[in-house]
Amino acid sequence: MPKGCVFNVQRYSTTDGPGIRTTVFFKGCNLRCVWCHNPESYSPKPELEFNRDLCIGCERCVEVCPRHVHAAGGGQAAHRENCVACGRCVDQCYAGALTLAGTMMDEDQIMREILTDVPYYRQSGGGVTFSGGECMLQIDALEAVLRLCREAGVHTAVDTAGNVPWAAFERILPYTDLFLYDMKAYDPDVHKRLTGVDNRRILENLDRLFEAGADVWVRVPCVPGANDGELGHIAQWLEGKPVRRVDLLAYHRLGGGKRALLGIKGGVDFDVPDAQVMDRYLQPFLICGLPAKHNA
Ligand code: SF4
Ligand code: SF4
């Protein structure tokens, strides 16, 4: 039974597809967007988070860790690189300063979470969305749970950045009702500078999804000073293609606090675009006749 590493199951989501949805976030991502707000999704494995503000200095973690990750005298999580995510220190940390991001779950465990809210899906035209990270990197677990959703009559959406082999799409196409497809830049060099990879395969896969007749909503993160110069090019590339909806998503700054919990150094914060700025970003999409809106 394939297991997936899941770092969050968000119920009652209204922003990840139609209706009321449960969004299942898989860990592991092969992009490194400079504006990322989910850095806990980088690694495909469970990992330790430490919130210094909650720590009361009891040093139980120092006593129980078999890998000497925590040092006495204020050195909690000082040697994170040795952590194997066994969870012993987390269980002993009554202050809640230590947590694990990511749990290994098989398809039956994931389905139990999903099926809890079936009445809400039915009433609202909702369902389940698989997101991340890049959920398609855990294709065995994803395919298995998508199949079960299809058998249970639950509407399915897959939120992807598309940077995976086309063969992965072929495996899940029969069980996926909707793709939420991220486009971050049009120019391959700009895409590489902003995300760490160029976008040739991403654009190719999106074209192939259109050819396959898939239902696709394109999602475009809008980050002032990073990808705003690309938005017009993205609109032009999409013009005339059978995209059902384009959502422009305003950048927000949740990533900074999460980087601190994980001990990730660096990272950049950008300006948060207000409704007026997002109105301006929307214009090229409307001019190209696309069914676009923004969320600001
Ligand atoms: S167990 Fe938790 S509260 Fe106690 S020292 Fe370790 S991190 Fe801090
Ligand atoms: S999760 Fe396990 S290995 Fe990691 S720091 Fe805690 S006790 Fe040590």
Image: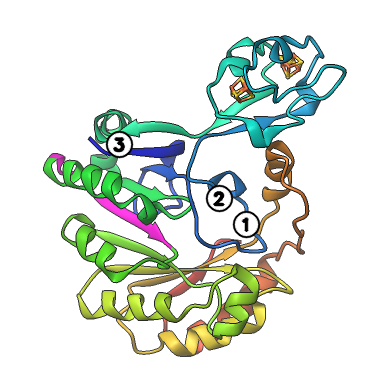
> Mark 1 or 3 closer to N-term?
1
Q: Can residue 225 be seen in this view?
A: yes
Specify whether 174 is left or right of 264: left
Q: In which quarter of the image is residue 81?
A: top right
Q: Between 152 and 264, which is closer to the camera in this rendering?
A: 264
**Coordinates of residue 188 in the picture (x, y in percent):** 54, 83
* Residue assigned mark 2: 42
**Is disc 3 placed on a helix, strand or loop?**
helix
> Dots 1 and 2: beta carbons under 8 Å?
yes
Q: Of circles 1 and 3, which is in front?
A: 1
- Measuring 18% from the left and 55% from the top, which residue is drawn there? 175
Q: Of circles 3 and 2, which is in front?
A: 2
Dot 2 beta carbon under 8 Å from ligand 2: no
Tell me the crowding category of disc 2: few under 14, some 14 to 19, or many 20 or more residues within 10 angstroms, Cα based.
Answer: some
Q: What residue type is labelled 3?
A: Tyr
Can you say whether 26 is above or below 119 in the image?
below
**Is disc 2 placed on a helix, strand or loop?**
loop
Specify whether 266 is left or right of 176: right
Specify whether 243 is left or right of 152: right
Can you say whether 115 is above or below 156 in the image?
above
**Is disc 1 placed on a helix, strand or loop?**
loop
Q: Is residue 289 visible?
A: no
Q: Furthest-right residue in view?
A: 73
* Residue assigned mark 1: 36
> Mark 1 or 2 closer to N-term?
1
